[in-house]
Image: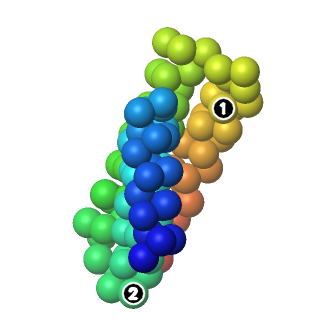
Amino acid sequence: MRYWRQFWHTLMVLGQHNPPQIVEAAMLTLAAALVLIWASERSVPYLLLSWIYTVGACVLILVRETVIPSAHARLNQTIATIIVFLVSPLLFLLYQTT
């Protein structure tokens, strides 16, 4: 019980100090869960929704770093762009194999 209380407290504190990061983490977690569901069921809507969440989270990172630059702004923008350009063809190839 203590572990969960500390976990939720950490989420609340993080949400108060950096709300966009919570949204990004939630979107990427949902994207990963949807890819796992797609791997077991091979249903295209799961794959498409996973791609949408991934691209949305990357765009959110790019917008956040443009509006409020952080100490690692260039690194975050580069990683978000790479993820978009790597995930799109990968998901297209996965879709072609179904």
The residue pinned by badge 1 equals 76
Work out whether mark 2 precedes mark 1 in sequence or the reverse, and give the earlier one: 2
Q: Residue at x 49, y 51 (%)?
A: 10
- Residue 68 in the figure: left or right of residue 15: right
Residues under numbered marks 2 and 1 in contact, where contact means CB atoms less than 8 Å apart: no
Q: Residue at x 37, y 76 (%)?
A: 38
The residue pinned by badge 2 equals 40
Q: Locate residue 35, reporting x and y percent.
A: 43, 70
Q: Residue at x 37, y 68 (%)?
A: 34
Question: What amino acid type should be assigned to the residue bearing mark 2?
Answer: Ser
In terms of image quadrants, where is residue 65?
top right
- Residue 90 in the figure: left or right of residue 75: left
Q: Which residue ends up furthest to the front in the rendered image?
A: 2
Callout 2: 10 Å neighbours few (<14), some, many (20+)?
few
Q: Locate residue 26, reporting x and y percent.
A: 40, 52
Mark 2 to mark 1 CA distance (whole Å) = 32 Å
Secondary element under disc 2, as helix, strand or loop, is helix
Tell me: residue 92, above or below residue 13. below
Tell me: residue 59, above or below residue 97. above
Tell me: residue 2, above or below residue 20. below
Q: Which mark is residue 50?
A: none
Q: Residue at x 49, y 40 (%)?
A: 14
